[in-house]
Image (cartoon, rainbow, N blue to C red):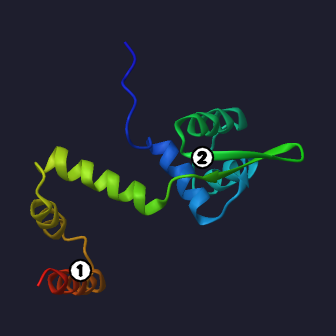
Amino acid sequence: MPRPPSEHPTDLELTILKVLWTRSPRTVEEVRDALAESGRELAHSSVITMMNIMVRKGYLDRTKNGRAFEFRPLIAEDEVGRGMVSDLVNRVFDGSATTLMLRLLEAGDVDPDELAEIRRLIQKATKKTE
């Protein structure tokens, strides 16, 4: 029985989107090269297959330029990030953003600059609600 389709990009789809968010449009070969530079060696046929699936899912747009197709993202990075974080909060933390933040802070992976930025953003959000 096939797995139901995900409402979020798969790991490989997300990696391809990250390549295209940095610069687009790009050809399959350019995306394949960028993936290889990041340590993900894939055959040309695998990359084109995945990118065509992403076109069907509405993640990418494809246009013909000479003999090659060029691809560009149709979904924004912040849109994907918000959706995935919202899903994480709902599925793992029962809808509690507070619990998510506590787990992040408890992990100890937040550097002082990031912590200062979090404080600044909390203060800004607090002022908006007053």
Binning the other alpha carbons within 10 Å of mark 2 as few (below 14), some (14 to 19) or many (20 upward) gives many
Q: Quarter of the image containing the N terminus?
A: top left
Q: Secondary structure at mark 2?
A: strand
Residue 121 falls left or right of residue 41 = left
Q: Which residue is mark 1?
A: 118
Q: Residue at x 58, y 34 (%)?
A: 56
Mark positioned earlier in the residue sequence (2 or 1): 2
Disc 2 from disc 1: Cα separation:
32 Å
Binning the other alpha carbons within 10 Å of mark 1 as few (below 14), some (14 to 19) or many (20 upward) gives few
Q: Name above or below for residue 34 compared with residue 51.
A: below
Q: Amino acid at mark 2?
A: Leu
Residue 104 falls left or right of residue 117 = left
Instruction: Say which of 124 and 51 sits in front.
Output: 124
- When asked about the image quadrant of residue 122, the answer is bottom left
Q: Quarter of the image containing the C terminus?
A: bottom left
- Residue 86 position, x and y percent, is 25, 53
Instruction: Say which of 20 and 130 sits in front.
Output: 130
- Residue 126 position, x and y percent, is 14, 82
- Residue 99 position, x and y percent, is 10, 60
- When asked about the image quadrant of residue 43, the answer is top right
Q: Name above or below for residue 129 compared with residue 54.
A: below
- When asked about the image quadrant of residue 79, the answer is bottom left
For the residues carrying marks 2 and 1, which lies nearer the camera in this image?
2
Q: Which residue is mark 2?
A: 60
- Residue 9 position, x and y percent, is 44, 43
